[in-house]
Amino acid sequence: MTYCKGLVSVVIPAYNHENYICETVKSIVNQSYTDIELIIVDDGSKDSTWDEINKMKSLYNDRFSRFDIEKQQNAGCALTLNKLIQKACGEYIYIIASDDLAKPEAIKLQVNFLANNPEYGLVVGDNEFIDSQGKKCYKDKEYKIVYNEKDAFFKTFADSLKYCHPYFDEDKFGTYETLYINNYVPNGYLIRHSLFEKIGNFTKEAPLEDYFLMLQLSKYTKFKYLDKVLFSYRIHETNTVSNLSYMYNVTDKTKIYEENLLSKIPDSELSQSILKIKKHGALIAKHGIPNILELCTFVKSIYKIKVLKVFNIKIYKWTKKDRKYRND
């Protein structure tokens, strides 16, 4: 399929974000990169999100080369993302949630990188934290919001991801074998549209859509992290990431679906690192997550004693009963 060269398709899956959607759209309107089309699908919002989207039609006409807005009956994020990607005409895809914000230079910097580095298929920058009112904030050791930078343990989203994942700053950023352990790619990524033809559709069977997307992309392309804040990630009471029980459940389902996908791919079509994962199975077995920092500490300690690398078969499991890790 042929896509419009240089065009960026900004796609927004919107749901119950009446207080934030206008800010999200305006952050795209204010991009320094000019060649953008805007596509929004309201997934059956129960609040006034759809009214807010329609209020900004004059902005769409004045700013974007093309815009497409639609309201549908609630279908879930996976099917909504599939529709958004199908509607897109651009060479690049930029996915943004309807409560987050893109910095004005974000898309321009990311397009410039991909245009000059054809071996890469995804580029992403750091995220700052903002609260429900759009005020910049930070996280302390317990992942609670603080506003004084002196009290911050995590100043940006990348700070927390680096704390959790040992490969964030290394050459292995975005490789399948590291993403298989856990997703650590920040928000606000730009992706080559052509890659979606290879990875297939989002599915309800893999309900953690961003993790599913990263796993599929890492099989076909290289990722690049730009060490600059290009995105504002909003923290509010409805963030799903704050619900650890839910996050464990959807991560588990997504990992199971990925293991099923791997089992159906002929060994001859897999790289050696992915083949090792396919043969040895999950290196972190199914576990509960007591809290984020305990999991991060566990991952870092395991990395240090070299038992989590894909070349090692040892498996560590979390047992809820005694809340300790044991070696199987």
Image (cartoon, rainbow, N blue to C red):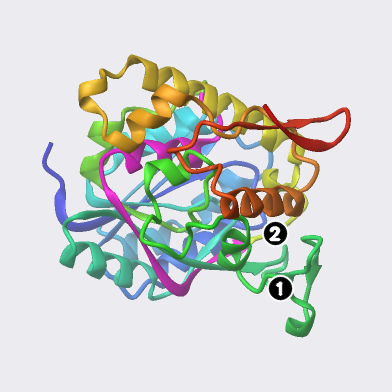
Q: Which residue sits furthest left?
A: 2
10 Å crowding of disc 1: few (<14), some (14-19), many (20+): many
Lower position in the chain sequence, tag 1 or tag 2: 1
**Residue bearing mark 1:** 137
Q: Tell me how far mark 1 sits from mark 2, CA to CA.
A: 9 Å
Is 324 situated left or right of 282 in this image?
Answer: right
Q: Is 232 located above or below residue 188 in the figure?
A: below
**Residue bearing mark 2:** 235
Residue 164 falls within the magenta-colored stretch:
no
The x and y percentages for residue 287 are 70, 31
Is 136 situated left or right of 41 in this image?
Answer: right
Q: Quadrant of the N terminus?
A: top left
The x and y percentages for residue 185 are 48, 53
Pick the residue in front: 236 or 123: 123
10 Å crowding of disc 2: few (<14), some (14-19), many (20+): many
What are the residue bounds of the magenta stretch? Answer: 206-233
The residue drawn where x is 25% and y is 45% is 193
Evaluate if marks 1 and 2 touch, with contact meaning CB atoms under 8 Å apart: yes
The x and y percentages for residue 259 are 46, 22
Is 66 situated left or right of 326 in this image?
Answer: left
Residue type at tag 2: Ile
Q: Is residue 18 visible?
A: no
Pick the residue in front: 251 or 286: 286
Q: Is residue 139 visible?
A: yes
Question: Toward which corner of the image does residue 278 lie, by quadrant?
Answer: top left
Q: Is 264 located above or below residue 40 in the figure?
A: above
